[in-house]
Image (cartoon, helix red, strand yellow):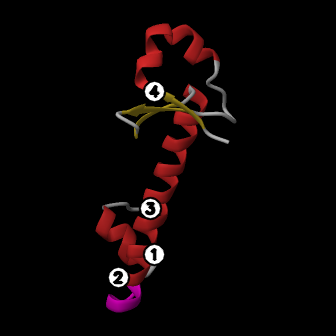
């Protein structure tokens, strides 16, 4: 069950912050409508990791679709394109 409080409860912010937990977010309302959410730093870090993984996965999918459409290149051509030369 979400923990929903009016933003005016922040006058006693210490009490509100005590209720924030990884398993319990606190949502703040303004004029009866959801406005803000309070998260722990662990939750924010996890969201950042998930966003980075999603971005990487999306870019890999785009690259794969482009390669299927335009064709793949072999390792030698890639090394030449990147300016990598084995001695």
The earlier-in-sequence mark between 2 and 1 is 2
Mark toward the viewer: 3 or 1: 1
Residue behind mark 1:
75
Residue behind mark 3:
86
Report, in whole angstroms, how far the alpha carbon at label 4 lies from the one at label 2: 49 Å
Q: In the displayed structure, does residue 1 sit left or right of residue 5?
A: right
Residue 67 vertical placement versus 39 (above, below): below
Quadrant the C terminus occupies: bottom left
Q: Nearer the viewer, residue 56 or 45?
A: 45
Q: Secondary structure at mark 3?
A: loop
Q: Which residues are magenta?
A: 67-73
| Cβ–Cβ under 8 Å for marks 1 and 4 | no
Report, in whole angstroms, how far the alpha carbon at label 4 lies from the one at label 3: 64 Å
Residue behind mark 4:
6
The earlier-in-sequence mark between 3 and 2 is 2
Q: In the displayed structure, does residue 16 sit left or right of residue 9?
A: right
Residue 45 vertical placement versus 64 (above, below): above
How many numbered circles does the render carry?
Answer: 4
Residue at 54% across, 35% down: 45
Mark toward the viewer: 4 or 2: 4
Residue behind mark 2:
66
Q: Secondary structure at mark 4?
A: strand
Quadrant the N terminus occupies: top right
Image quarter of residue 66? bottom left
């Amino acid at each position: 069950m979400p923990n929903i409080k009016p933003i005016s409860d922040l006058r006693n912010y210490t009490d509100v912050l005590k209720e924030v937990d990884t398993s319990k977010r606190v949502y703040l309302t303004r004029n009866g409508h959801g406005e803000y959410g309070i998260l722990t730093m662990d939750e924010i870090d996890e969201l950042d990791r998930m966003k980075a993984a999603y971005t990487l996965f999306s870019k890999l999918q785009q690259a794969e679709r482009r390669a299927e459409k335009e064709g793949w290149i072999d390792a030698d051509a890639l090394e030449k394109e990147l300016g990598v030369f084995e001695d």
